[in-house]
Image (cartoon, coloured by chain):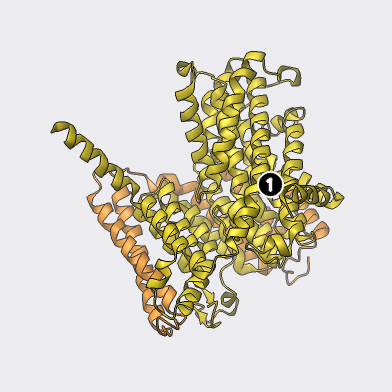
Amino acid sequence: MNQRTAGLAAAVLFLVIGGGQIYFSLALPRGTLAEPGPGVFPLLVGALMSAASIACLVLAIVERNPVGFDLLTDAARPAVLVAALAAFLLLLPRVGFILPSLLLQVVTLQVFGMLGVWRRLAVAAITTAAAVLLFQTLLGVQFPTPSWGF
Amino acid sequence: MNAIDGILFGFSVAFEWRNLAACFIGVLIGTVVGVLPGIGPVGAMALLLPATYALTPAGALIMLAGIYYGSMYGGSTTAILLKVPGEVSSVVTTLDGYEMARRGRAGPALFVAAIGSFAAGTVGVVGLAFVGPLLSKAALTFGPPEYFALCLMGLMILSRLTDSSLSRAVVMVAAGLALSTIGMEPMSGTSRFTFGFLKMSQGIDLVPIAMGMFGVAELLAMAEQKLKTEAPISVRVRELLPTKEDWQRSWPPITRGSVMGFLFGLVPGPTAMIATFASYALERKLSKHPDQFGKGAIEGVAGPEAANNGAAQGAFIPLLTLGIPFAPASAMLLTALLIHGVQTGPLMMVNNPEVFWGVVSSMYVGNFMLLVLNLPLIGVFVSLLRLPMHLIASIVALLCLVGTYAISNSMLDIWVLLISGVAAYLLRKLRFEPAILVLALALGPILERSFLQSLYLVQGEWMEILQRPITAGMLVTGIVVLASPTLLRLGRRGVASMRKV
């Protein structure tokens, strides 16, 4: 993706967020200058974000040598890592800690370049056991309990 | 309590065995975090926040502060032995430190780095003990308008001191402030931007966001390339001692770097890193051998290493005396103080002297511990670098998730962690600086409260705020810093046109 396109997209996104902040702030009481209400500060922040986003938008348009980066190639492994982290979060309340942790470790070890499926499984099992011992047994962290009870 | 009595009282607190243990654990973890790339000191502080619940407020702060300044020591080890800065403020050390190591002089480079950090730590403690009470006393006269101006000045300076362009920096400031408005409004208690989620009425916690932006984002950046474990240059304890010439060349840069670093630390932003660059440039200018810089000049290690530790100590002053965090690490310490129910601000020295003086004196104890950890025990930390990087990275990923969950057993917190991590990764690609967002999020509630209180105080006559001398001085300083590149450009043009005439 061209840096100019990405910069434009980011500026537009922040402009939308700033606009949204202004819109929702207007629904809050603003009071008077002597007795300001809860809507005043967020309104000013929204205005600041919108103004700065417009400046970013202009900069992205007029920038002479935008640096390019290949979002797809660069982001392939990070995307797998994000998916693994999201899977951990989705599974944790449903099946407890052990299975999501094993899965996360296997995937992250592969993403970070560890070779060999069995080696990854063995290391994942050891680190998960260590995490259970440290967090659950020693520090008393209460992970969600799975419906089948382990 | 005067400074000497305060330091002595502080030592009595720091030498309580629990606090001594907290200090040791803090500096040990700080060194490890500094040595190993990945999680960084702010992430480590966030991760260990739940572990401080069992400690006293002084113990908690002693441990977390130890992680921060300990990482400054550890960061130099990888910079010298691997040319990989373990921490961002060690980037400059790679220039001459690694060159020294390549020429078989890793020992003196590590020794001078550790001694420089220790000297800066000493200057920092003395500075904190003497400047802290003065500033605290002055701050007692501050009203809401002064706090408002101070926060605003901090944000203006921060916008100029980072790599981002001004407009990108302001977007990050606004994004941080916008996040801080989620939850209850400080004066009336009205719920804002919660969209029906009860948990959000308590506001967005700083810890998951900081962990995401400093921990998860770093992991995502690391995932872009397959990690390699590189063998560090080996170093033996008997090779550590520098020669007489090394000493003679090192002590002036250490002295200058310590003072310069401390002063930089008082300013908002990534000042530890800026102080190292400033110190390097100064030493190169003052050196009799400027040609040796970049090829293994010991001054290029001594000055910057003292400067980064000096800045780390100086950064505690705005937090401990005014209750205002000017750096992401200070924001984490503020969170810890609030969790422990300590009232921050100038009255902290009166109401909780054990926290202020205990932390100040513990820094000296901690710096001494770090000297032992980073010189005779350097081999232990060097061996950490032989651990496979893929193993370290995957453990850090699990630690980020479980550590964040453990803070309040909240699934929402780990979702916030993941979302902020992905956001920070993308923001960095687009040359936005997420650290500004984190700091604005920490400053947001203070800024809003002081802004609203100021308007109530002056009954809406906002010009009265600007007519207060301290307020006006702070705002003018902020504006001058903000406009400085334009002013400099205009000045240069003026000089050039005068020369033509």
Can you give x and y, in whole percent of width and height, for residue B173 in the image?
A: 44, 60
Chain letter, disc 1 residue: B
Can you give x and y, in whole percent of width and height, for residue A128 in the image?
A: 73, 52
Q: Is residue B493 above or below residue A6?
A: above
Q: Is residue A67 above or below residue B447?
A: above
Asked whether the viewer can see residue B229, the reply is: no
Instruction: Single out the residue that lies furthest toward the right.
Output: B17
Of residue A83 and residue A7, the one placed in the foreground of this image is A7
Residue type at tag 1:
Ile
Of residue B224 and residue B108, the one placed in the foreground of this image is B108
Instruction: Single out the residue that lies furthest toward the left.
Output: B501
Can you give x and y, in whole percent of width and height, for residue A148 in the image?
A: 76, 70
Q: How many marks?
A: 1
**Residue at 46% from the left image edge and 68% from the top image edge:** B178
Q: How crowded is mark 1: few (under 14 residues within 10 Å), some or many (20 or more)?
A: many
Quadrant of the image containing the C terminus of chain B: top left
Chain B takes which shade in the image?
yellow
Q: Is mark 1 on a helix, strand or loop?
A: helix
Query: Which image quarter: residue A26?
Result: bottom left
**Residue at 59% from the left image edge and 32% from the top image edge:** B305
Please state if B109 lies on the left or on the right of A126 as rendered: left
Quadrant of the image containing the N terminus of chain B: bottom right
Of residue B311 and residue B212, the one placed in the foreground of this image is B311
Chain A takes which shade in the image?
orange
Of residue B103 and residue B332, the one placed in the foreground of this image is B332
Please state if B296 lies on the left or on the right of A96 as rendered: left
From the image, tell me which residue sits under label 1.
B67
Asked whether the viewer can see residue A25, the reply is: yes
